[in-house]
Amino acid sequence: MTATAHRGRTAAAALTPPSRWRTLLRSHWAMPVVLAVTLLATYLWIRSRQLDDIERRSLNADALMRMLGEHLRLTALTTVVVVTVAVGTGILLTRPALRWIAPAATALANIGQATPAIGLLVLLSIWLGIGSTTALIGLVAYALLPVLQNTIVGLNQVDRKLVEAGRGIGMSPLAVLTRVELPLALPVILAGIRTALVLAVGVATLATFINAGGLGELIVTGIKLQRAPVLVCGAILTAALALLLDWLGGVIADLFRPRGLG
Amino acid sequence: MSDDVMISLDHVSKRYRGQKVPAVENVSMTIHRGEIVVLVGPSGCGKTTTMKMINRLIEPSSGRITLDGADVTSLNPTELRRRIGYVIQQGGLFPHMSVATNIGMVPRMLGWDRRRIDARVDELLDLVGLEPGQFRNRLPQQLSGGQQQRVGVARALAADPPVMLMDEPFGATDPLTREHLQNEFLRLQEKLQKTIVFVTHDFDEAIKMGSRIAVLGERSRIRQFDTPERLLAAPADETVAQFIGAGASLKQLNLRRVGSIAYDEAHLVTSQESPAAVLRHLDESGDWAVLTVDGERRPLRWVGPRDLRPERDTLDGVGIPAPTVEPRATLRDALDAMLTCGCGAAVVVDDAGRYRGVLGIDRLMRAITEMRETERSRDRGVAEASYYRPPMPRTLAAPAQRGGAR
């Protein structure tokens, strides 16, 4: 009697939604704080220094916002293209009719990632010319694999029995995909997207070599002209951006984790 | 006759590419409206494959399967499956959806409006004995195995299909829960009269659930297809006999229902009765115990002379809990109940759990003795002709007959 009452209570607790936000806050508060402190410290450090002409040309609000904007734009576009292409391809490659191609497709995506990023960008620029389109293509080729692979793995790890149960009770193939397979594969797919996002932020620093802008400009300028503040500022901003997006990915993953799993 | 046929398999085979031996070879059978046909056989014999060909989860390589007169391969698979309920082990519930969403899935696909779906979900939860208010919004992981199984049955019934396929539906539950689910399902079936194909490897379950049982061998070959009674009385060959196992008469415990035996009566008292009065009754009547019941005449406990303490005022909490069985439980279930409590009597109750009578171990033993004697005399008679009787003509599946009447 007491056992059933107890079970009833825990079940009710698990069903009340507000606890979700509280857990979210509890497990994700640290990263924004760390980032804010780091950025503030960097800002104060730069302010405390006497900047020369060269440094001032890079380290001013207008230039920083432009580079940050370019970087974000490149990253966002990459992510959108990668998600569309890789998730779509992943879905196709897990359909029974096309399953046999999957190994070949993953191998191909592997080439994209195994090639050193800078080599990939330079090769592409010889072929397609320099500029942001070329950078975008390079980044997409580079970030495709984790999403493609995780989509395939995520869909394949969905219990075959559930897929068959879905078909067995009369759900259309599309309904089985959208209501059973994708929701249950979502955590794994999101993890892949998160990895791709962080990769894209990092590799986007190389875009400056083919004249596509971004925060890489600061780093390259800092190295070439031996200006430590510029170099450090570029590195910290890139790292902070990568960490911030990774954090955001984590929050989203927790928010969209299907109920009823573990 | 042909009007009566719901499902027919006509020389159906399934060959997988790259495998020499077919998984299912040349199976023919007809299944009538409203009966439960159990496919039973050792694991890997192709019984599940055979069943899945009916709703085209697996496509037959050759042969013909008809559902209500129509060739299943001529129908859109998804449409076809919406007319066939499908229950698998542990219910196969979608873990990320609430009980209500799981059950309402097919009605939603059929385009029912929200109100109608909600009403249907509640109706079905009631039907399988789960309180809608309490269970509607739960997730499958918040249910016990037996409850998940019930939701699985409810989901299969959602669009009221005339046919149900059940693949070891009660396989993953503990024996007590399984017995309960089986009885409940038989009660449901009395009401619903669905045509059911039921797959199991448990012969006792087959005997209990089946109107007819198909004992399958390798490649799903039908060794015998007959009613449980005749299967036990006259196994078609040695393999079937072996599968039935030793002591077919004891297997009949799975076949005979509690309701088929006359009950005894117990002396009923409420918990408020005084121990002294009970003692007096026991002395006068010579009964071994009295049964305490609640206000609704639901049995509580057996109270014998040794449980009684004259210094107490009432019988509250005195005695051993009385095991109960429903009339549609098998004698085996009743025997299990008696052995569990160690009290040699099971209380027979109706659907609402109210007292109807008592089944004593003596009557049960007498029924067993009778069954064994019938078997022995039959075996003697059979042994003179040939040990095994040939299967009855009806048991061999007739080729599909579909008259012009349809």
Image (cartoon, coloured by chain):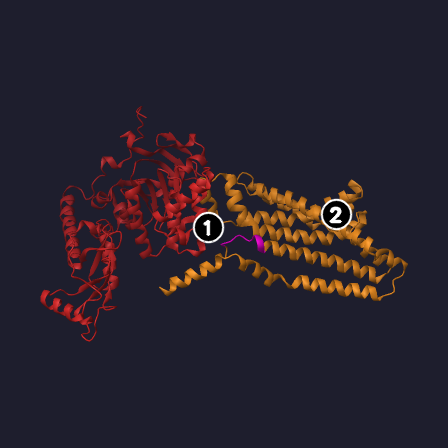
Disc 1 crowd, CA 10 A, few/some/many (<14, 14-19, 20+)? many
Q: In the displayed structure, does residue A22 sit left or right of residue B305?
A: right
Tell which subunit mark 1 falls on.
Answer: B
Residue A166 vertical placement versus B267 (above, below): above
Q: Report the span colored magenta.
A: A254-260
Figure disc tally: 2
Assign a secondary structure to mark 1.
loop
In space, the residues marked 2 and 1 are separated at their CA atoms by 48 Å
- Residue A257 lies within the magenta run: yes
Q: Nearer the viewer, mark 2 or mark 1?
A: 1
Residue at the extreme left: B284
Q: Nearer the viewer, residue B123 or B233?
A: B123
Does label 1 lie on the same chain as label 2? no
Tell which subunit mark 2 falls on.
Answer: A
Residue A167: image location, x then y, percent: 46, 41
- Residue A196 lies within the magenta run: no
**Quarter of the figure with residue B28:** top left
**Quarter of the figure with residue A129:** top right
The residue beneath circle 2 is A120
> Chain drawn red, letter?
B
Q: Nearer the viewer, residue B393 or B380?
A: B393
The residue beneath circle 1 is B98
> Chain drawn orange, letter?
A
